Amino acid sequence: MATAAAAAATATAAPEEERTLQEELSLPIILADRVSKSAQEAESSKFECSELAKQVDRLSQMLRTFVRLSTNSSSTVYDRPVRRICCDITKTLERALSLTRKCRHSGPLRHLFSITTTADFRKVSNLLESSIGDMRWLLSLFDSDGANLSLPPIASNDPILAWVWSYISTIHMGPLKDRVDAANELASLAKDNDRNKKMIVEEGGISPLLKLLKEGASPEAQIAAANTLYNIATDEERVRLIVDVMGIPIIVAVLGEAQMKVQIVVANLVARMAEMDSVAREEFVRENVTRKLVSLLSADLVLEVAKPQAAKTSIHSLVQMNKEMTDKSTRNPKLLSVHTSSFSDGSSRGRKEREAESPEVKLKLQVSCAEALWKLSKGSLATSRKITETRGLLCLAKIIERESGDLQFNCLMTIMEITAVAESNADLRRAAFKTNSPAAKAVLDQLLRVIQEESSPTLQIPAIKSIGCLARTFPARETRIIGPLVDKLSNSNVEVAMEAANALGKFASPENFNGSEHSKAIIEFGGVPPLMKLLRSNDQAQVPGLVLLCYLALNAGNSKALEQARALNALEGAARSVVTQHPDLRELFAKAIHHLTLYQAGGHPHRQTFAL
């Protein structure tokens, strides 16, 4: 029943939504003429009808003036408040028409057809006065200096609505300075609370903001529009609305063409939208925003990679993007030095503007672009491929090496998201992270450096996670990865130690072809004692630590280190409580305990351990 009612309501509303603005305005004008004529024909309450007619005539003149102004306006008229006010005026005029028609009867028959009182006329008069006030407010939108912050009667109980209407109308029709001020006011309102965001969206604020952003009338106008959209785009539903009105092509175009201070806020907008909505992420990739972001991020970097023979196989897409660089490299085969600004999408004027900007502005742009790449990469195979097929990995590695603070962190998080996608996609893993790839080597070197040299857990954790995600790419002989991870098992920060256990678990896992060799390397690097200490000292680390211990038992059950650490006792003691909370680990624990009993001194293959 509810569905049927909703469908009926939609069908009823559709014709009104399809009316043009002129059609919307013509109905109350026609009604006003009818009320005036009916008032002239009144046989009773003539004075009251005459007074109503004066108000109606005044209202009719205002409606006609609005029609003339809107027809002659060079700007698009913002119709949301017009339609709302016209709807209310129509209802009021219908009520006035009904009242005046009752007065057309006189004599003894009057009481048979209608009863009118002074109170009836007073009510209708008050409604007409409110309609006149609404029309006065609408007309003021055409000649007000800046946004009109007066309250029309229709919004007297909700001043925010009137302000939103006025600001959006100003963005539609006002001079540039007023449009900028109005957009900034909307940004402030949107930042205040979700109700304001919802109201701006419902009252049609997204399209004029995108238009203001696209027009590029001034950097200040673009910044104001982008900031407002950023403050609005705080959940999936509102981001999807920006996508639905074709906002993403506009945003990407501005990112590639605007001044640097505009690019900063637009990159922030890309990051926010990508974070909130997976559909937006994919749309951004289709519009090739990744290349623009990488170009902006790496504009002042000089990347050095191996000679072109290696480049053909490991950075093939880099060469594809800029084929002329290959010709240069053949003249100097020892080194391919890629000055990344040669990939910039901007013009020579844009490059000159970049050179003139302060280091602080350049840094802000890099931070924003790196964050956008991070958010776009999360769970996105398409974005990860785009980044790895360009010079993106080399760029990220270079920045992690050279920079610090938010820029370094954002680049690390981007690497972490790309490796997380690669972990579950063998094609990406093989293409982007081959051990002989200069880009992959550069990334790995920096991840190891962060793990070994940085003291901040905020940086160490994404670096450790990234290496863990790539565990299946390393050959058995690549043992330089294991040592730094083993060292972190004894880190004083529990999260760092847990992530180290998680990462080592991926190396030792049966799903890893080289899991057996990696397990032996973990033990040779002294991984068992700090692992046992971690299990004893912290409950949070129980699951990743015990899973790693199980893998070590399965792959190297005859290890003296495991026997000396009483690994069998540790597994038996923890098994029951862990399996209760994680039943999916029951089989792993059973196999590990059974395996250890075959090798431990005094062990017996039929030893009763814990109730399975």
Image: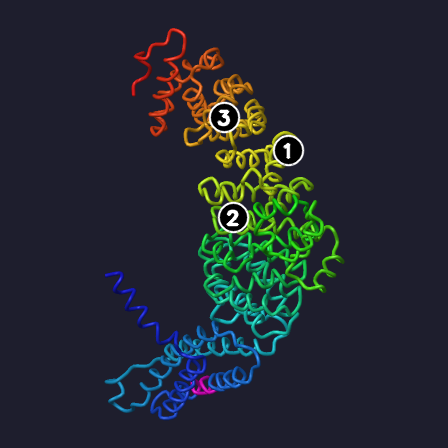
Name which of mark 2 and mark 1 comes first in the sequence.
Answer: 2
**Helix, strand or loop: magenta stretch:** helix
The question of residue 409 being in magenta is answered with no
Task: Please state which of residues 150 and 214 is positioned toward the viewer in this rendering.
Answer: 214
Q: Contact, CB < 8 Å: mark 3 with mark 1?
A: no
Mark 1: few, some, or many residues within 10 Å (few <14, many ≥20)? some
Task: Please state which of residues 203 and 513 is positioned toward the viewer in this rendering.
Answer: 513
**Residue located beneath label 2 in the image:** 384
Q: Contact, CB < 8 Å: mark 2 with mark 1?
A: no
Q: Secondary structure at mark 3?
A: helix
Which residue sits at x=40%, y=19%?
A: 574
The question of residue 52 being in magenta is answered with yes
The image quarter in which residue 107 lies: bottom left
**Residue located beneath label 1 in the image:** 449
Q: Which mark is residue 305?
A: none
Q: Secondary structure at mark 1?
A: helix
Residue type at the position of mark 3: His
Q: Which mark is residue 518?
A: 3
Name which of mark 3 and mark 2 comes first in the sequence.
Answer: 2
Mark 3: few, some, or many residues within 10 Å (few <14, many ≥20)? many
Q: Secondary structure at mark 2?
A: helix
Magenta part of the protein: which range? 51-57
Kindly report the distance in space between the C-alpha atoms of the residues bearing marks 2 and 1.
Answer: 23 Å
Kindly report the distance in space between the C-alpha atoms of the residues bearing marks 3 and 2.
Answer: 27 Å
Q: Please identify the quadrant where the N terminus is shown.
A: bottom left
Residue type at the position of mark 1: Arg
Name which of mark 3 and mark 1 comes first in the sequence.
Answer: 1
Residue type at the position of mark 2: Ser
Kindly report the distance in space between the C-alpha atoms of the residues bearing marks 3 and 1.
Answer: 21 Å
> In the image, residue 203 lies at what x, y percent?
48, 66
> In the image, residue 299 lies at what x, y percent?
68, 53
Colouring rule applied to residues: rainbow
